[in-house]
Image (cartoon, rainbow, N blue to C red):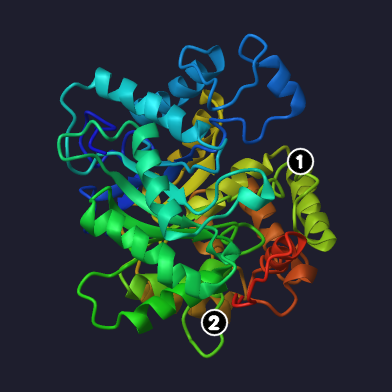
Amino acid sequence: MTTSSSSNSNNNNDDPQRIPKRPLHNPRLSVDSVSIVGLGCSSFSTFFWSDDDSTKNSNNGQDFTLANLKEDHPVVQEWIETICYAVTKTGINLLDTAPWYGHGISETVVGFALQRLRSQQPQPLDGGDALIVNTKIGRYELEPSQQFDFSHERTIASVRTSLQRLQQQQKAEGGYIDVVQLHDPEFAPDLDLLFQETIPALLKCRDEYRWCKSLGMTGYPLGVQHQILQRSLEEFPNSATPIWDQSLTYAHYTLHDVSLVNRTFVGRQESFAAFCETRNMTLLSAAPLSMGLLTHQGPPVWHPASDELKRACRDAARLCQDNQMDVTHLATVFALVEPRIPCTILGIKDIAQVQAAQRAASRISSLTATSTTEAEETNDIEKEKQSTKQHPSLRRLQTILTPEEFKVVSHILDPQQGPFCNVWGSQNFYCSWDGITPVHEFWKDLNVAATKWQVE
């Protein structure tokens, strides 16, 4: 997607109105930097709506569905304006959507917004400010029996449909999506299915049809992504063209869980971040609020975290509230400060939330001027842990937080006395939830024979 997100220089880290950027090392894209905040587009749909929301926003009595979606509906117009504001006013240049988000509504709304952006900028620019548009394949409908489909045929059809919804088919070169991602691969009933059908279909979309520029993967269990990436290297050891260009994980770089950079896999001495870096893969993160855990209102009832972790997050939020601080702001700043993650995707539903993200990101400007390698960061962290026994992020946070904020965050991250000390235990500053058992329960409920191939 070559619509320019800014008429200014690519290096806008000195502009307080623009979200700072970090280098993006994906040679398949014409983009050399990415905003440290990406726009998660799931909320530009009915994905999180209650029954009351559906009734209030119905289309003249009709259900608010993809089939009845009208671009001139007030809610759709608000969503379009939010996307355009994020791109043109703050410099966000990564949009992340999926067929699963509103079952096609999110992709369609993003397409409306891209069309408006093109009309506002009739001569879009290539280069460092171009937009990156990500979508996904593999997860689709609400009905459990139709929710996941990793077949070759459905994968091809899904990418074709996404091109149409995103209105990318009008481009002179035939139309493309920047990154197509394998969505929640842990739900594949069999690992061989991914390698025999899904991945070949994705490669055909990228290399033969040229419907997308890059391929990525997104999901929760780090071990599953690591397993798929490792098998890809083993099955295609001499491939001149790597399969995967990007990995997106969620809720693994938060106040309670930094396993993305700290946890090593059995038999290996590298974190998932290091694994991606040494293989020239872009690493993105999402859900810095841990799907509602790190908010004052708390998570939804279906949240998979343990009661102990939920209680610890409530204690952290209460500590912030007692000191007249917003836990969501501090949790967002915490996530954005990590230099090995060029972009953190935030779920955003309106302009007010874009502005809140902008305020958090503006505090990071002084830290985005230089890039830190995994080796350099690991060396610094080890030195700090030996000398101070502190959380590895505190050193960076101290330079941007107020003394009062730093005192509160230091207590939250205290491994001996902070709210997470019990859930961390002997772990290296991380506590997550089980992302594998729900997969097996899902297929068991459908009476589908699924192999237990997932490793976490």
98 to 285, vertically: above or below: above
* Gap in angstroms between the C-alphas marked 1 and 2: 36 Å
Q: Residues within 10 Å of mark 2 (few under 14, many from 20)?
A: few
In this rendering, the answer to whether 455 lies above or below 281 is below
Q: Name which residue lies at 61% across and 46% down.
A: 330
Foreground residue, 451 or 100? 451
Locate the N terminus by quadrant. Answer: top left
User: Is residue 365 or residue 249 the one in the foreground?
Assistant: 249
Based on the displayed image, in which of its 4 quarters is residue 278 positioned? bottom left
* Picture disc at residue 265: 2
Write the residue at 26% across / 18% down: 120
Of the two numbered discs 1 and 2 on the same chain, state the one appearing first in sequence.
2
Dot 1: what SS? helix
Residue topped by disc 1? 321
Amino acid beneath label 2: Phe
Label 1 environment density (alpha carbons within 10 Å; few <14, some 14–19, many ≥20)? few
Tag 1: residue type? Gln
Q: Are marks 1 and 2 in contact (CB under 8 Å)?
A: no
158 left or right, relative to 295: left
